[in-house]
Amino acid sequence: MRKNGKNPENIALNVTNLACERGGFEIFADVSFTAMPGEVILLRGPNGVGKSTCLATLYGALPKSAGEISFENIDSEREPREYLHIVGYVPGVKTTLTVKENLMFWAQLYGGTENVLPAIEAAGLDAIQDSEASILSAGQTRRLGLARLLVANRPIWILDEPTSALDKQGDQWVGQLIADHCAEGGIVIAATHLEIPHLAPEAVKTVMIGHRAMDHAS
Ligand SMILES: Nc1ncnc2c1ncn2[C@@H]1O[C@H](COP(=O)(O)OP(=O)(O)OP(=O)(O)O)[C@@H](O)[C@H]1O
């Protein structure tokens, strides 16, 4: 039987005919999927079709223009967002803080600092933990953004191009991180053009986003 340490409440997500408009244009529409404990949802589609917009809509950072997002088994007193981690394409790193201070900041926000040093180590950032984030390379910045996933346990991860800018070892690290999260009942929703290593094929659902966003670009 699968362990469910990452999602003890067996939280699941249902998305039905989701759509989002920006600036009066429909960016994407008709996105539907269910995400059950242990599943990876890969949002796929060409540049500009609305994958990042869809992730932001799922997180609640952008309003939906149609459709439904519903969570199963969450505490109705709590905001759905409290069950989510989002790491965007720009990973939200504070450039005036050091690597460690960034993780401390997120850890305090999420309610506990005991996982900060293990997260730094797991992300391979030990040697530069006291460096200001402004001097980090693109790959180091992505590692720092992703290390946020490790400072507090949240069952659903929303990730935009999680392996972009990473070297081979980083690519393997992130793939394993996602695979381990899902093996313990967590859910990952990721937009990516790349193949993510280590994912169990039976755990992966691919959701294609259509071409509507390109229609208004021409
Ligand atoms: N503020 C905005 N107002 C109107 N349209 C916007 C706004 N921000 C982004 N868009 C448009 O939304 C569309 C979808 O962008 P989005 O970043 O979600 O695509 P994507 O599928 O993630 O692309 P990529 O694969 O290149 O990362 C694009 O055509 C973009 O121009």
Image: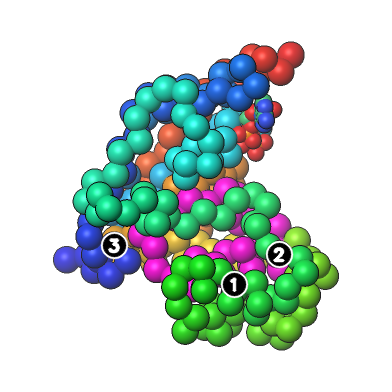
- Place of residue 167 in the rendered image (x, y in percent of width and height, measured from the top left): 68, 65
Query: Residue 94's mark?
Result: 2
User: Which quadrant of the figure has residue 48?
Assistant: top right
User: What residue does disc 3 label?
Assistant: 7
User: Which quadrant of the figure has residue 87?
Assistant: bottom right
Q: Do the residues labelled 2 and 3 touch (CB within 8 Å)?
A: no
User: Which quadrant of the figure has residue 58?
Assistant: top left
Tell me the distance, in whole angstroms, between the alpha carbons under discs 1 and 2: 9 Å
Q: Do the residues labelled 1 and 2 touch (CB within 8 Å)?
A: yes
Q: Of the residues tagged 2 and 3, which is closer to the observer?
A: 2
User: What residue does disc 1 label?
Assistant: 105
**Quadrant of the displayed image that contains ligand 1:** top right
Q: How many marks?
A: 3
- Place of residue 29 in the rendered image (x, y in percent of width and height, measured from the top left): 47, 22
Q: Of the residues tagged 3 and 1, which is closer to the observer?
A: 1
Query: Would you say residue 173 is visible in this rendering?
Result: no
Q: Check disc 1 and give the amino acid type.
A: Phe
What residue range appears in magenta? 139-166
Query: Residue 96's mark?
Result: none
